[in-house]
Amino acid sequence: MLLRLEKVQRHFGGVRAVDEVSLEVEKGSIQGLIGPNGAGKTTLVNAITGYVPLQSGDAWLESQRLTGLAAYRIAGLGIARTFQNIRLFRDLSAAENVIVGMHSRRRDDTLAQLGTLPLFRRDQRARLNEAHRLMETVGLDPAEIGRRPAGTLPYGDQRRLEIARALALQPRLLILDEPAAGMNPSEKQGMRELIEHLNKDGLTILLIDHDMQLVMGVCQRVAVLDFGRKIADGTPEEVSRDAAVIKAYLGTGSERQVSSAPGATGVEDVTQVAQASAKAKPSQEPSAALLDVHDLSVSYGSVNAVRSASLRVAVGEVVALIGANGAGKTTILSALSGLIRPTSGTAYFDGLDLTSAKPSAIVRHGLIHVPEGREILGRQTVLENLELATWARRDRSAAASEIEAVMKRFPILGERRHLRAGTLSGGEAQMLAIARGLCAKPRLLLLDEPSLGLAPQMVDVVFAAIDEIHREGTTILLVEQNALRALEIADRAYVLETGQILLTGSGDDLLHNPAVRRAYLGG
Amino acid sequence: MDFLIQLFSDPVTFWNSHTLLISQIAINGILATSMFLVLYSGQLSLAAPGFMAIGAYTAVLMDLYLRTPLALNIAAGTALAGVVGAVVGLPVLRLRGVFLAIATIGFIEALSLGVILNLPITGEGLGLKNSNADPLGGINLVLISLVVVVFLAWRLIKGRLGYAWTAIRQDELAALSQGIDVARYKLIAFVLSAILAGYAGAAESHLNFFVDPNEYGVTRTVQVLTFAVLGGSGTVLGPVVGALFLTSLPYIFKQAGDYIGVVSGLILILVIIFRPQGILGRGGFAFVRPRWWPRAQVRAPST
């Protein structure tokens, strides 16, 4: 065993981010670690690498106890990692980034530096050559990009460079935290080949990713986390047939039978997908739309997060936008509410041009965004949070009765009106976020991941509330990871894959569409 | 303008008539390098005047009471500043950004109220007379020191230490993941910076006949920080150029008289608008345009 975790535990406040997880990583193997959003995967990695201290339990690297060691010591012992949200030294050149990685095995040359130059130059050249070699290992061309600042590299290259920097430590264990996040299928394939190549050279890898096909494809063993607990551990085949895993991954509450985990027997047949999408296409896109988005593209620097997306929402509809992590769902909502600007395309909301209007004007026009992660004001009371939402209203008494109506709609908020919002549970906080949106009298409500990080019963409650709001006449555009739940309440849905709308159709159609599973779970 | 004309047409007379300015530039250059070291390792420390005061008072007091030679006085002042730097740095460097800045200002104030203004030996706020000062002879000392200090700093940032500092400045978490002991390297930068500031203080006290307690306050800190901002903190020479520029500004714009503060303020604002990376920073001038100015349309690449 190279890495051994024994009942590792880490809580944040009342949240059990990692709850008595035991895990063993065999030397020379690729171990997978998967789980839905918020399952505690990254926290577990941070615990292993010493970024957050363990509250109980033990971690061992062969015979070396890791518990209580500082992060830099653990890195020095040979555990290298990459980060979910790339953390390169952006202003340093690509080659310099790799040279920084050699720190812990580099002779301290501080004093030699002050005097003897030639010796230093020779060492420096040797280090530069090694950096170039490592860049070649991960498939980067040092001649072309070696001198460029790391922050200016294309997204996929940055991911590779981060791996090269990690390799510069000459690690015994390499932890990859979502190395394929935000990549398109061909880049993902390249990443997969790189991982297999590194493993063939004898490197032990702990791979965390959302892309089931990648994880199931390259790993010898896979562990599954859900709500901080390990719910399964075994070969990919065993795990993919595990009922608990299927439930955790595809979403809760749905009684539908799913015969295997996503990805394992995923629909790879492209023609089948094409047929399915052709069949689904003509479904009732409304002619008179409240929201009309056409050819919308958004990029973050070199990453094209959304590519030519078109969608429409008519008055009174619930429309779901589903897709895997990093598909571009949240980006679309942020573009619609004016928080980020699209690079091209048009978006109109009842005659208002959303691509140029100020966010405040968009809100006044009745398009209200309930953001991912709720963003409520934790130190204010529930009532104060709601009062803030009506802040722009002239008519105070109408606003007050509005708040009372919303509190009646969510009785739990009425009961807790004088509690600080920060003390609410996740589900209650989500209710508050939605209630705050309702106070602004929306004509179109954008809900971003309302079920994120909620316990199953809470998800039921939140979805029931959404359904009820809809029946009272509010138009809703819903973004969800929990695809099955979203499709159940949606009139229509759009399926996003790596920034593009793959197909659209009525909720019921898509529920039975094999292509959905493919888009949702990667392809 | 006379100032610049004289500089180029008659350097010898210029040198002889501006010794005070030149030695002040050298002292400020060393201080700027002290600031550079902390900024280069990603720390906004404003403690420099405190360490200067330690250097200055130690050197002068040793001269007054022990009659020890100059070199020993300066060395002792510098060393004591380094020791205090280590003691202060250990707890304070857990803080980051603005909080570190506030804590280091707290250090200056505590030192000033607790030691400089209240101990009989330091003159209780009246300052110290330093009759052995040598303003003319000291000029060579401080100029050579400046060159040596800049060279050493330049060499340091080229090696393992410099790489570690850069990594910490850019991303502490990522630096940890590369096996860099962040706390240790931050402390090294802080102590080196304290040593330089202490040295600058001790050397400065040798140039003036009077050690003025009011010199070592927050005003001085802001001035030193301005050197780095104005010159650009990305290279060793940037802060030194900032010091050179700001120190000679009152001489260049002699006509401004009492309004020199307004002039230097305006220049500082212009530099920050048009060259936010500093005079010696990389890249050209920032193109500042009003909101209504037409912008290039960005098109999404077709995929």
Image (spheres, helix red, strand yellow):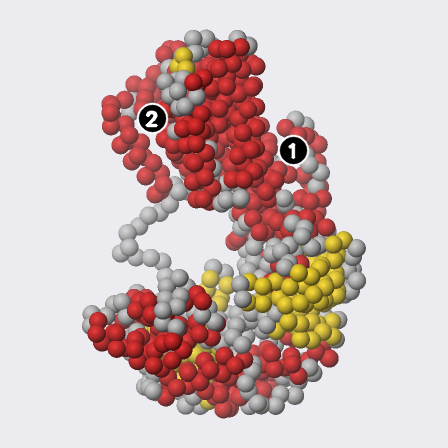
- Which residue position holds label 1? A110
Judging depth in this view, the residue of B84 and A286 nearest the camera is B84
Chain of the residue that carries numbered disc 1 in the rendered image: A
- Residue B194 lies, in percent from the top left, at 52, 30
Category of crowding for the residue at label 1, using alpha-carbon neighbours closer than 10 angstroms: few (below 14), some (14–19), many (at least 20)? some
* Residue B175 makes an appearance in the image: yes
Judging depth in this view, the residue of A487 and B148 nearest the camera is A487
Q: Residue at x 72, y 76 (%)?
A: A236
> In the image, A257: left or right of B272?
right
Chain of the residue that carries numbered disc 2 in the rendered image: B
The secondary element bearing badge 1 is classed as helix
> In the image, B158: left or right of A422?
right
| Quarter where residue A27 is shown | bottom right
Q: Residue at x 39, y 68 (%)?
A: A419
* Residue B32 makes an appearance in the image: no
Judge whether B65 appears above or below A53 on screen. Answer: above
- Residue A100 lies, in percent from the top left, at 63, 46
Q: Which labelled disc corresponds to residue A334? A: none
Q: Amino acid at mark 1?
A: Thr
Judging depth in this view, the residue of B17 and A254 nearest the camera is A254
Image quadrant in which the C terminus of chain A is located: bottom right
Q: Amino acid at mark 2?
A: Leu
Comparing marks 2 and 1, which lies closer to the viewer?
1
Q: Residue at x 37, y 88 (%)?
A: A471
Q: Residue at x 42, y 83 (%)?
A: A465
- Residue A492 lies, in percent from the top left, at 44, 86
- Which residue position holds label 2? B249
Pointers 2 and 1 in contact (C-beta within 8 Å)? no
